[in-house]
Amino acid sequence: MSDSRDSAPATRRKWRTKSRRGCQSCKARKVKCDEQHPSCLNCIKRGIRCDFLQPQGQMTPSITSATLELELLHHFTISTCATLTTEPQVRELWRVLVPQIGFSTRYILDGVLGLAALHMGRYNPARRDQLLSQATHYHAASLEQALPLIPGIAPQNGSNLFLFGVLTLFFCLARPKREEDMLVIGNNGVIPEWLYLLRGMDALIDEAESAIRNSPVSLIYRTTDESLDFWKAHSPEDNEALNQLEVGIRSLTSREERKQAVLQEAMDALKRSYTFSSTRFSEHDKLRGFYTWLFKISDEYLELLKNADNEALCVLAYFSVLLKQLERYWWLEGWGVHLIRRIYMLLNDEYRLWIRWPIEEIGWVPESY
């Protein structure tokens, strides 16, 4: 936009940095490295080992022991697994089957142990730093083993890689947030690894659909599939706050046809996800509304967010209300407030008025910036 509305306060920051600390693979290819740890996005996309990961032979967690792994596995089966879903059958899958898969597939076991370490650390302050360090090591080990397999996905490993993607999603949402994290835009303005993997699950399912459907892991896939069918087919309920935002966006982007179309697509998807926030839907369905919006937003919309576009940030602010409603899940706790606060800091005074409704719904009190 070309008028004064584009002006932003001095605190507004773009996610662009210059650095010579990129990984060796990106340097060799002479491409910009996002420096994301434990593996940069370029290496994730190419399915190669990033040298940000620990050297071969050092992937065993620094304080690892059979006792610790048994403790973490026990914690996962009696506690963590119950926090991942409200569906009884899916909960049993996490409790019984996933650890069994881990015994023969190390990257699944490492994913389980990493998530359990994060969960245990939240409720054990005396060991929090140690457990967070262990969780990071297990997560890096899981990535190193699984990422190179994704380009060659086959029926033999399709269900395990799908499970790896889900575990990675939980881990990345649950780990401590950095100040500049914007959920769908990470440090240095790049798409975080969990979102890349989440949005790539469609491709995983397409490549190995029969294998996933015929495996017990299909319980996760089937519930997603059924909710997605409803998400696509239903007529969204009227929401006055979303309608007002939509009118404002249309007015201010009337001369930017492509941008308006991108924002409208994100708004239409958000309206459908808001349907699941109704009290008549289960907690499991509400989670599907959250996931599906992340599946459906376009790369062009993510690019607008990367450039701190005002209208795109306002749409994301309304999405943060859904996050706040899902904070009964420990791995989403704090994301609603964190996200609305970051958006508020990036907007100028005029656009801050646009997000008064989500601010009030979340219950956050703006600080002075």
Image (spheres, rainbow, N blue to C red):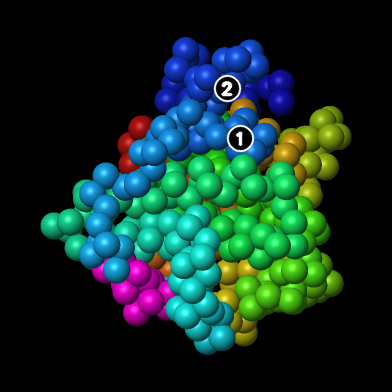
Of residue 46 and residue 83, the one placed in the foreground of this image is: 46
State the residue position of label 1. Answer: 48
Cβ–Cβ below 8 Å for labels 2 and 1? Answer: yes
Residue position marked by numbered label 2 in the rendering: 25
Label 1 neighbour load within 10 Å: few <14, some 14-19, many 20+: some
Dot 2 or dot 1, earlier in sequence: 2
Observer-nearest residue: 174 or 354? 174
- Element carrying mark 2: helix
Determine if residue 168 is in view.
Answer: yes
Across and down, in percent, residue 294 comes to 65, 54
SS at mark 1?
loop
Q: Amino acid at mark 2?
A: Ser
Question: Which corner quadrant holds the N terminus?
Answer: top right
Mark 1: amino acid: Ile
Task: Determine whether 174 is above or below 51 in the image.
Answer: below
Q: Which portion, as a residue range, is magenta?
A: 71-82
